[in-house]
Image (cartoon, coloured by chain):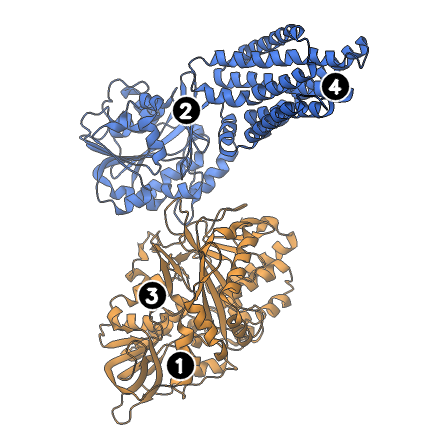
Amino acid sequence: MFDKFPTDRRTLLASGLLSLTACTKNKKSAIVGADHVSGHRLWNQNFPPSEPGPKVGTLIIGAGVSGLAAAYTLKKAGSNDYHILDLASEPGGNARAGHTGDLSFPWGAHYLPQPGANNHDLMAFLTDCGVITGRDGRGQAVYNDDYLCHDVEERLYYQGAWHEGLIPWKSLEPSTIKEIRAFFAYTDVMRASIGRDNKRGFQIPLSLSSIDPHYAELDRMTFANFVRGQGWTSPFLGWYLNYCCRDDYGTDWEETSAWAGLHYFAARSGENNKVLTWPEGNNWLVKQLIKGSEAKFTGGEIVHKLSPEKGSGLWAIESWSETLGANRRWLASDVILAVPRFAGSRLLPELPYSKDMMSYAPWMVANCEVDSMPLSNGTPLAWDNVPYGSASLGYVVSNHQSIERYASKGILTSYWPLTGGSSDYLRAVSGLRSTEDWVRLVKADFEMMHPGYSDSIQNVSIWLWGHGMIQPKPGYITGEYRQALNEAPFPRLALAHTDMSGISIFEEAFAQGLKAARQVLGVTPWT
Amino acid sequence: MAALLLASAFVIATAGLVYELIAGTLASYLLGDSITQFSTIIGVYLSSMGIGSYLSKFIKKDLLKLFIRVELLLAVFGGSSAAVLFVAFSEVSDFRILLYASVMITGILVGIEIPILMRILKDEFDFKELVAKVFTFDYLGALLASLLFPLVLVPHLGLVRSGFLFGLCNALVAGASLKVLGKGQRWARTESYLVGVVVFLMTIGLGAGDLITRWGESLSYPDPVITSISSPYQRVLMTKRANDLRLFLNGNLQFSSIDEYRYHEALVHPGLASIPGAKRVLVLGGGDGLAVREIWKYPEIESVTMIDLDSAVTDLATKNSLLLELNQNSLSSPKFHLVHQDAFQWLRTNHETFDFVIIDFPDPSNFSIGKLYSTRFYDLVKNAMSPQGLMVVQSTSPFYAKQSYWTVVNTLTASGLKTAPYHAYVPSFGEWGFVIAGRHDYVLPESLPENLRFLKTEDLPNLFQFPKDMQSTISTINRLDNQALVRTFEQEWAQYVR
């Protein structure tokens, strides 16, 4: 994961990393995540001359889910001659995790919805790693109970009480309920609908979706305008759909394409609506992807230059190693470039990248160590706890899957997509905030949901994702620009990243990695 | 001055009757037979008032000072009576002596008060006015007390705090009298210290958190509370009335010594007696040791392992003399092994196998306990069962919570087990359900241990027959990701007041 903050804030952030700013009663809080600093070296391009480095068959640049899915596919195909480099010291990208004592917690992506039956590649992977344990009498996948999100899955804090689910049916006006039902009826129709090319309108991975212009039209307007255009104007439905856009895309619904907003609902079958989750979030999946390739991963590598070597037909990859303090020149027959495009275009200027066309959502994630679990009015503590009308998405109980019945200690992960302004502006503002500013915001959010509870919060660790994920703004997904992004300007170069999909979810990253690995392996990519 | 003293008469009368009602209620709680208790207490109280009135004639001088003193004594004795009686109940050998002594002292003090009050006031009014006024306030105070007591005091404050509240009222009356009437008296300073001390004591009593809560809590139990412990996991509480010993966890009845043998015989024997050569038994929950008592009726049992999260319960079962008598010291056998751990976590790391597994958890009334009734949990139990092994699950009432009961059966079936549902009548619980589950079909035992009080071998087949109103219904499977059981259970029990 690469982050970019305005350079003049760099010192502030760096000091934020080092100082464990004491709040009260020995409670410690800090901003963690060191990528901001090393990330900036890429912009400065201030490296010593290179020295010869290792030679490898396939070099995978980027150890996020796309890169690791590529490594997993190469390994599964019997290849052994590959290596993975990443800027961060740990693999995982957005799906990294932290640990304290015997508790684990996510720093970003933290769940995977049960995939649809037609997502064979993903189903095969989940079977490999024991998430799917077999098939039942009707041929349906049977999931390991330890990983299916335990009941209660989600609840909403609305008008002073907790309600099960995200829609407090019993507290809403009949007119609002009518609109919500109409919206869901519409998504049901979209889920079943098939375009003139005989493909479903909305699919995961997204590349399987129909390219019928009938659907592309939805990509020309914002989700908010689409919904209002249907005559659905209730504030609750608006909040809910905005929440969904912020949750999945880190983007306000006023900026999200209607196609993407509907994809959230229409691409997943109505039956398989359960999610898979782990205390460390999707880092659990990361560990499964990298299993057997651990020795082929090198972290702390700032890859800063990628060029075809004249004559040999090999790629020359210059990388500054933080640990070795050396600028090495790797050689590889194939390169899988699995980094976000704003960074990728820095190493290979031939890659198309336009700041106007591609926008990345900034996020803040706060992990709060607590010495007791919050008590609630209404539905008891759930996995996902969402406050109506908050700037946050609420909090997730990272130890929800623990079967320990009387957990007192725990870690609550508070998610904040930074919306309500241009992403450049929001990045600048978030960089200006001190650790204490963030902690105060997080605590205020908890106080709103659980009055008096913020005293139970011991440590708060803050992670700022400067460029958290690509934003599916109108025109991006079905436009020509994204088509062009997917075309590699050189042979023996495979590209893999969710910003070429437009939707930053595990399934897309996984499909991107598979596609790139198959390209290297000479297998026709899945279409 | 007159108005203040008449107000005093009102407060004295209210407080006096409250003390009497506290004594009567306490005696009914602790000794039972409320008709006898109330009539004897009223008798003792009124006659003591007579004694007090008689004694008042020996008071010759310093009327006001004595009025204040008596008022303070009444505050101390009456105010703390409920607290003292509660604490003393399990400590003293004859509770009745203490009870009637307390009622007498209170009665005598109230009896002295009214005549002294009338003598203080005799110069203010003529006789017929005086008698009319004092008795009007006296009887009105009694009316107020009789209404306050059941409607406000018992439900909101509980007996102990009500006592202290009226003790405080008495002390304040003493203080007010002292301030208004005792001005300039030599003894005023000493008395004001005494008033201060009593007000302080009553306030402490009224506010004292945990102890009072513990006593106050006992009001929600029909029988006197003899032990209550707050463990990290639950509130463990025992009550006893006559020969009925009861254990409550978080307010839910676990057993009554009157009929627990029915429950525990039904839980253990249909399963265990049917396994030839059973040697190793696993008990999940059941920390009271009563199920284990039944297991020792099979001399061939070589080991019993119990997994119970809460050491507060097992400590009680190994140390409390009443419970030890009931469980026949079943947890002290050298063949018994105890592990304090969450059963789910223990099973995840366990590699041993057992011939019989007894699952005796609280009812699935919340999501934490609901997990212990899930397919995932039964899968783990299955792995801990020897090939010929069986498990038995206490599975709530097939009458009150029919769908919940059949959800448990269905969940066991979904875990790939053959089930044998059965039920038994336990008066303190009502009709109660159990399920035996194993890899093979269940076969009824040919014989049961001797010396059982409830089960007979020839009656066993009846337990497995369900009458029409308890028969199997369409029910779901309880999984960790749906917790269907907790949801059903909540709905079903909501229809009954337990």
Comparing labels 1 and 2, the label whose residue is closer to the camera: 1
Across and down, in percent, residue A435 comes to 49, 65
Q: Residue shown at 48%/73% (left/top)?
A: A12
Q: Nearer the viewer, mark 4 or mark 3?
A: 4
Horizontally, residue B340 falls left or right of residue B74, namely left
Chain B hue? Answer: blue
What chain does mark 4 sit on?
B
Which is more N-terminal, label 1 or label 3? Answer: 1
Question: Which dot marks residue A41?
Answer: 1
Q: How many marks?
A: 4
- Residue B70 lies, with reference to residue A160, above or below; the image says above
Q: Are marks 1 and 2 on the same chain?
A: no
Q: Report the amino acid beneath label 4.
A: Leu
Asked which secondary structure carries label 3, the reply is helix
Find the residue positioned furthest to the bottom.
A311
Cα distance between the residues tagged 4 and 3? 83 Å
